[in-house]
Image: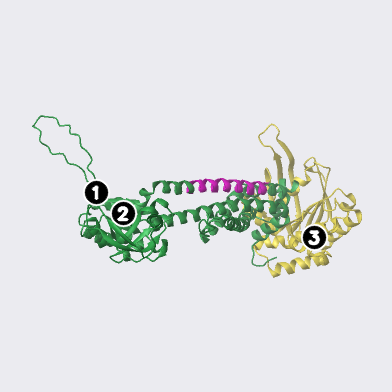
Chain colours: A yellow, B green
Amino acid sequence: MVKPAGAEQVLRLEKVCKAYNIGQPAEIEVLHDIDMTLDRGQFMALTGPSGSGKSTLLNLIGLLDRPTSGRLFIKGEETGRLGDTEITRLRAHTVGFIFQDHHLISAFTALENVMMPLLLDRGFPSAAAETRARDLLQRVGLAAVAGNLATNMSGGQQQRVAIARALAMNPDLVLADEPTGNLDTKSADGVFELMRDVNRDSGTTFLMVTHNLDLARRCDGIIDVVDGRIVG
Amino acid sequence: MTPWLPFEWIAAIRFLREGRMQTMFIITGIAIGVGVIVFMSGLLSSLQTSLIKRVLTSQPQIQLLPPDQIARPLRGGRPGEIEDPTIQRPSQRVVSIDQWRKIRDHMLAMSEITNVSPTMAGSALAVRGDASRAITLSGVEPATYFNIVRVPDYITAGFARLASDDIIIGIELAKDLGAVVGDRLNVKAAAGVPVVLTITGLVDFGNKGANARIAYVALRTAQSLLGVTGGVTTIDMTVRDIYAADTIAQRIQAADRVQADSWIVTNAQLFTAIKAQGSSNLVIRVFVGLSVAFGIAAVLVVSVIQRSKDIGILRAMGASSGQVLRVFLLQGGLLGFVGSLVGSALGAGGLAIWHASVRAADGKEIFPLLFEPSLFVSTAALATLTGLLAATAPALRAARLDPVEAIRG
């Protein structure tokens, strides 16, 4: 695992557990005593078999869910003490998401989808937000389809828009849940290289869930989860 | 994106526009509901206004009469004897209201009362050649009385002039006597002095019975004809608030030694019918409103299910549950508002077409159509509020969606 010397710690998990159906006969613990850290500028792969707890771990790190026990720090701030409003705000400003099937909002154009995090943060559209969104679309090579609805783009294009959207708030950490899972090899390679370029250029930390071992090997390191535990 | 619109408005409009088939169907449903409300309310309020106007301009709103004449038995029995007299109701003579000028001045001083006019009324006989007819004679002061009963509005021939030897009669009475404007009538009563009067106008109150009996003369002429010099049998009045007439009448009756009848009591059946119409209209409004509300709620519940992934991704990108709540509330409000605009146009158009196609036997409109702006404003406000309320449950459901579950689908 490559760790930039003296780099700022973006994420730290201490003894994080996650259980469902607590107190019921069907109680199940899917993550056990997870300890991990991510530093600024790292590009890590998260691998493991289906059902091993990768997505649950990603949801906890993305502040979409809360651990049953243990502590989770984002940029040194412990998130367990924060209320829902503060969590929402921290998530919006610190974490960007890229999902397997892009999840663009079909009622909006590519440009508007990229503007969406800025719109949600400020409440109103602004010229600055539009400029930022256009720059990001340019960055992912999709300036020409800025006005297209999500439904009028190829899978690869939609995933590139999703990457641009994840970067809109200039987050410290981007969580990508199998971003290349639904793409052909060529498109998958293009999307991966794009994320890698962003990581190199802006120093944004990436954590990418993938089943593609070839792509995983091209990351700075691999975090392997099996049966809810980090094994490597 | 429109720069001055907040996120919630932009998202609500986009979501409605994207599901345009669903949106169109529910707006059509709301429009039909609102159209029925506007049609019914417009029809009933026009009919009521027309009826009330006709009633209130052809009779006083409050009428003061002398108290009933009652028999008072004389007590002559010895102490310890039980009396059981049979009291016969005396016939009611034409008598004047005691101290009527003082009562009139008292009425004029009351702020709720807008017009006061003394009247001398009684029965008489109108004779022309061999024909004679019993008439209800009303002696009035035209200057004040015509503000209470709009006789000039009901004149069909001649004009509303009442000098001391003039008479205005109903059109049926004129037919029965074979008289026209300018003819002379011999009028006599049981007491008093017979007079010969000239017909100056014919009136039509739209009631055959009234048109066959009614006759107006000057107050002094009636006093002389009926043998009650200087007296009046009724004081007629109008009030500022027609629906407060009965309360005012009761107050006057308690304060002065007169009997006070309001138009609400003398037209009890009409008033009950108007109230019943109002109640049935309210029931129709409530049920149509409920069906509109359930329609909006059903569409939005489906929309929340369809958009759960969008909601999840919006939450992941930083949308607060309040923002999501407002997006769906706004959709409900917008559906209600747009539906009410279309429905108001449909209802008003339908009513105008109905009004133009349905005519009285003589080809005239059955009653004038009134479109109160307040009806449209209140309907639009109510429909928007209904939309907002109907959207509450689906919006809360959307706001409470767990982003992880929503994204997973």
Given the image, what chain letter belongs to the residue carrying mark 2? B
Q: For the residue labelled by badge 3, is the local secondary structure a helix, a strand or a loop? A: helix
Q: How many marks?
A: 3
Q: Which amino acid does label 3 sit on?
A: Val
The residue nearer to you, when weighing B361 against B323, is B361
Q: Position of residue B65 (x, y in %)?
A: 27, 52
Inspect the image, locate mark 1, and give the three-letter code of the amino acid beneath it: Pro
Residue shown at 64% from the left, 67% from the top: B4
Q: What is the distance, in whole Å, between disc 3 and disc 1 at their CAs?
A: 91 Å
Location of mark 2 (residue): B63
Q: Which residue is drawn at 21% across and 43% down?
A: B70
From the image, tell me which residue sits under label 3: A161
Where does label 1 land, which residue? Answer: B67
Q: What residue type is labelled 2?
A: Gln
Q: Which element carries disc 1, helix, strand or loop?
A: loop
Of all chains, the one bearing label 3 is A
Q: Is residue B294 magenta?
A: yes
Residue B387 in sight here: no
Q: Marks 2/3: CA distance?
A: 82 Å
- How many residues crowd around disc 2 within 10 Å: few (fewer than 14), some, or many (20 or more)? many
Q: Quadrant of the N terminus of chain B?
A: bottom right
Q: Is residue A134 something that shows in the picture?
A: yes
Residue B273 shows which numbered tag? none
Q: Which of A147 and B73 is in front in this view?
A: B73
